[in-house]
Image (cartoon, grey):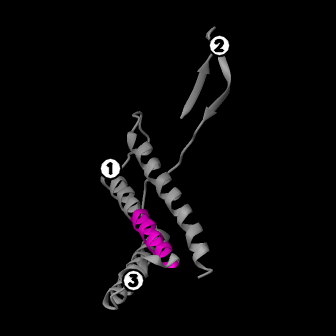
Amino acid sequence: DLKFTFGQGGGLKRPHSLKIQSVPLELYTRPIDLFRLTLEMVFIAIVGFQFGTEVNELLECIAKGRPLEYFLDFWNILDILNIALFSVGIVWRVQYVSLVSANPLEVPTDEYKLLIEESAQLQGTQVSINSFNILICIFRLFK
């Protein structure tokens, strides 16, 4: 985004702001990209395992007749939040990969494509979610 603010006399006011974003639009084309894809699949499996573990803990509490006991434990609430944020991050990543894969961008071009802005927004949101989740993961180390 390039933003200018004009005064009443028509002159430019300072400061001007310029936001430049860069997003990769060629996914999984090199061998290192395929390695990253493999790591992403392993990560999804780990999140699925973590989800299954939490469901198992909840079912054990229900079997004991004390379902609220599970939700009264601070660490279980933190685990649920962590898994939920991981899941949201995975969904955003899948949306980003789907958007980029479905709309290949040919360069050079004289057209302005909204694909770049949409991709940057998706990736920016994913980074924000993952950043917050990293803090939760660090806090969980004290469990």
Residue 51: image quadrant is: bottom left
Residue 9: image quadrant is: top right
Callout 1 amino acid: Asn
* Labels 3, 2: front one: 3
The residue at the point 51 percent across, 63 percent down is 130
Q: Is residue 14 magenta?
A: no
Position of residue 98 in the picture relative to residue 86 (left or right): left
Report the predominant secondary structure element of the magenta stretch. Answer: helix
Please tell me how crowded label 2 is: few (under 14), some (14-19), or many (20+) other residues with Cα within 10 Å: few
The percent coordinates of residue 84 (x first, y second) are 42, 68
The percent coordinates of residue 94 (x first, y second) are 36, 62
- What is the spatial separation of the Cα atoms under label 2 and label 1, in whole angstroms? 40 Å
**Residue, disc 3:** 49
The residue at the point 55 percent across, 62 percent down is 132
- What is the spatial separation of the Cα atoms under label 1 and label 3, in whole angstroms? 33 Å
Callout 3 amino acid: Phe
The residue at the point 40 percent across, 68 percent down is 87
- In front here: 25 or 98? 98
Q: Is residue 24 visible?
A: no
| Quarter of the rendering occupied by the C terminus | bottom right
Q: Which mark is residue 129?
A: none
- In front here: 17 or 138? 138
**Residue, disc 1:** 103
Callout 2 amino acid: Gly
The percent coordinates of residue 23 (x first, y second) are 49, 51
* Labels 1, 3: front one: 3
Q: Which contiguous range is marked in magenta? A: 75-90
The residue at the point 43 percent across, 44 percent down is 116
- In front here: 131 or 39? 131
Q: Earlier in the sequence, mark 3 or mark 2?
A: 2
**Residue, disc 2:** 11
Secondary structure under tag 3 reads helix
